[in-house]
Image: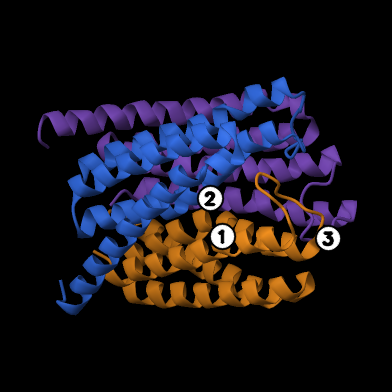
Chain colours: A blue, B purple, C orange
Amino acid sequence: MLHYTSLVTVLAIIFYFYTGVRVSPARQKFGLKAPVMMSGQPEFDRIFRVQMNTLEWMPIFLPLLWLFAYYVSDRVGAVLGLVWIAARILYMVTYTKAADKRGPGFAIQAFVCGVLLVGALIGIVTSLVHGG
Amino acid sequence: MLHYTSLVTVLAIIFYFYTGVRVSPARQKFGLKAPVMMSGQPEFDRIFRVQMNTLEWMPIFLPLLWLFAYYVSDRVGAVLGLVWIAARILYMVTYTKAADKRGPGFAIQAFVCGVLLVGALIGIVTSLVHGG
Amino acid sequence: MLHYTSLVTVLAIIFYFYTGVRVSPARQKFGLKAPVMMSGQPEFDRIFRVQMNTLEWMPIFLPLLWLFAYYVSDRVGAVLGLVWIAARILYMVTYTKAADKRGPGFAIQAFVCGVLLVGALIGIVTSLVHGG
């Protein structure tokens, strides 16, 4: 079993959960009772979009992380996963301040997913060709 | 293979799929043709938010369920998964009636995820420490 | 390891990622700066909904694909996964043109998920009954 990747998966889920936790006090601050979602108030919408964008990337990040861990390396995958979480935290902090500051955090986490994808793809194709 | 967890995974997906199926007749009832999403009509928005919130929790529930099943117990994980589905059904039924009644179902399903997370974390760390 | 299913998983993630990539130029075309999401402009909303609907189906498609691959067949699962991606591409192309043309692509991808679900369910129950 891929213990390091399992651990980073739990950490990524805790972080993702936290991006949703932040929406509730933001709702109260701006007087937006559920089920209302979009407010037209950019400060609330940015906090909401951080959660949504992280949700959008979970089905990209988690499967690629596990395919990379299996086909390439549990430990290298886990380190890349930690970088992804760190970049996501940067994205959350900067996007919450201003929409046009979210670029670097977003770019790093996307780059990490690209590395996971290329690694996984090489590993899968190698296994298929060599009949592994 | 973790057969009981596999079965509960399929049941959870069927439930989640159903939360989306409910949106289509609600669209017709309120005359909201796709791609329109938010209506400003609370009755529609609550039905839509049940689907969205379940979607938001799928990347929390499913990975934690499987990590718990692997590191702790397939059968205990499956039972917790059934409790999660039941709490989600309660959340769906109560939220559809009124937004301020959705608390108990939401709290129970979140608690179940917390138990899955703590169990998985203990199992992972134990395996890492003992070199399992 | 289920190499063919791994490969199709990566392809499905690339496609899903692409549905999100399309939103960014659409934002610029219609002058919708983040964090604004819903525009009231149907042409933008359709492009956004293609991404959202694909996101909504990822937690249905991916787990069912893997359960089917494990319990039934890696190769048959991978072929069904390719059909799912093709139907999703059809859905994307037709929905982008007009909302009422999205039916066939949507129906085919839903049917594929139904086949994956029934296959997985039969495999799981058979294994539970036979103590496999």
Q: Whole-percent x and y of residue A65?
A: 32, 51
Q: Of the residues tagged 1 and 2, which is closer to the observer?
A: 1
Q: Amino acid at mark 1?
A: Gly
Residue A129 screen position, x and y as percent: 19, 79
Q: Which residue is mark 2?
A: A56
**Disc 3 and disc 2: Cα gap in Å?**
24 Å
Q: Outermost residue, left direction?
A: B131
Vertical order, A20 against A128 (above or below): above
Question: In the rendered image, which quarter contains the C terminus of chain C?
Answer: bottom left
Residue B24 or A48: which is nearer the viewer?
Answer: A48
Question: Is B82 on the left or on the right of B35, as rendered?
Answer: left
Circle 3: element type: loop
Tell me which amino acid carries mark 2.
Answer: Glu
- Chain label for disc 3: B
- Mark 2 secondary-structure assignment: helix
Q: Residue C120 in the image: x percent, y percent?
A: 43, 62
Q: Chain of mark 1?
A: C
Query: What's the mark number on residue B94?
Result: none
Q: Which residue is mark 1?
A: C20
- Front residue of this view, candidates C17 and B112: C17
Neighbourhood count class around disc 2 (C-alpha, 10 Å): few under 14, some 14–19, many 20 upward: many
Residue beneath the point at 69% across and 76% down: C94
